Every structure is written in structure tokens, then in C-alpha cells.
Amino acid sequence: MIAATPPPPYYAVIFTSLRTTTDDGYDEMAEKMEMLAAQQPGFLGMESARSETGITVSYWSDVQSIVSWKNEAEHLVAQGLGREKWYQGYTTRICLVERDYSFVAPTLPK
Amino acid sequence: MIAATPPPPYYAVIFTSLRTTTDDGYDEMAEKMEMLAAQQPGFLGMESARSETGITVSYWSDVQSIVSWKNEAEHLVAQGLGREKWYQGYTTRICLVERDYSFVAPTLPK
């Protein structure tokens, strides 16, 4: 899914990760966190893909919403488990989205 | 791969896409564009993953470098072919990375 975000400016959190070979509840937790994030104030949308590298981008109205989500109680537990068993490494980047543009293929024959 | 970017501020271009079912040279072109991007002034790194959705994030030192890459001749051809046959839709977001932080799992047993 491509997130349907409002016109800029808004914020993006780019979470890029390399997984360990340990599953042990990872998929359930990822799904739970995705649902929980979507209930937070300021949440605008989320996009996710995984090959060798995993990339999850979440979109937020402002920095305070990102800080609040980072410190949400169940999310803190998930972050701890992530560092303990699910991730070899990750980088989180907090970004101000200044401009965006989209393309949608025409559905009518040319 | 997680891109080894310098300390912020720097720029990120988040390219989120849905593919058509047409391959027809897509992989070769993606690889060619990745190599060509890496040769551009201001290029800092790139991360890519694809599930149902594809996400490619490229990192740049400044906006002018992003504009120059967007208008690079071979890249313009690739963008045209992308709209013509490879993508159902995409969104490109130009972002100022304000903060980042990383985690690397310890390799020693606890």
C-alpha cells in the first residue's frame, strides 16, 4: 500500500532494519505494533517492505506525535525485544517531508 | 543494506511504488539506475526492499543534487518507461532528515 498522506509538510520516520534468523513472535508483534501505531494521535499512514533489508516508513503530523509513539508503553516493550532477539541492526531517521508527488497509471487503453 | 549516512542534516527521497505484472527489462533498469545514482554528485546511499509494495530510499547531501538526479538524461528515460509499463502507481517524497540513530546487536554472548 502507498500511504495516502495529506499535503506537506508532515513527518516521516524511516526505519531500516536487518533481521536475525529468530522469528519467535516477530510477525505477531509487527502486526500488533502496526495496529497500535495507527491508533496514535498524529498518525498519517505507514508503508512497509522487506527483502534482505526491511524498510518501514510511518508518517506523522508532527515531531511530538513521533516522540509520544516512541515512548508508548507497549511499543517500548516491543523495541526492547527487537534489540534483544529480532534485529541484527537498524537505523531510524526522523524526516520532515517537504514535497511529494504521485503517479497513477491510466486505466483506459491508449 | 542499511546506508551509512553522515550525521544529519541531509536529504532522503522515499520512492514507494506498486508494480505492474510487466517485467520487460525492469530488473536490469533498476540495477542500472542504482549504479548511475551512486555516481551522482551529492549521493550518500540507497536502501531498497520490495514486498507487495516496493520502497526505495536514496540519501543526498542537498536538494540541488536531488533535482540534478531527477533530470539526468538516462534517468529521465527510465522514469518514462516506468510510467509507461512498470508502475501501477508511485509516490515520491522529498524529506529533510533532521535526526537519526542506529542500533547494532552485540556479537559477544551475554
Image (cartoon, coloured by chain):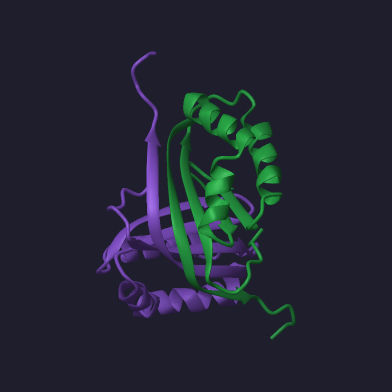
Chain colours: A purple, B green
Which residue ends up furthest to the right in the rendered image?
B108
Q: With respect to residue B46, does B70 lie above or below?
A: above
Residue drawn 35% across the image and 73% down it = A63
**Quadrant holding the N terminus of chain B:** bottom right
Residue drawn 45% across the image and 59% down it = B95
Q: With respect to residue A7, does A62 lie above or below?
A: below
Q: Where does residue A37 sit, x and y in percent of width and height?
A: 33, 65
Q: Where does residue A51 sit, x and y in percent of width and height?
A: 60, 49
Closer to the camera in the image, A71 or B90: B90
Residue drawn 31% across the image and 48% down it = A4
Q: Where does residue A12 sit, x and y in percent of width and height?
A: 41, 62
Residue drawn 73% across the image and 78% down it = B107
Picture quadrant of residue B36: top right
Q: Where does residue A5 sit, x and y in percent of width and height?
A: 31, 52
Which residue ends up furthest to the bottom in the rendered image?
B110
Image position of A71 (left or right of B39): left
Is residue B75 in view from this perspective? yes
Image position of B22 (left or right of B29): left
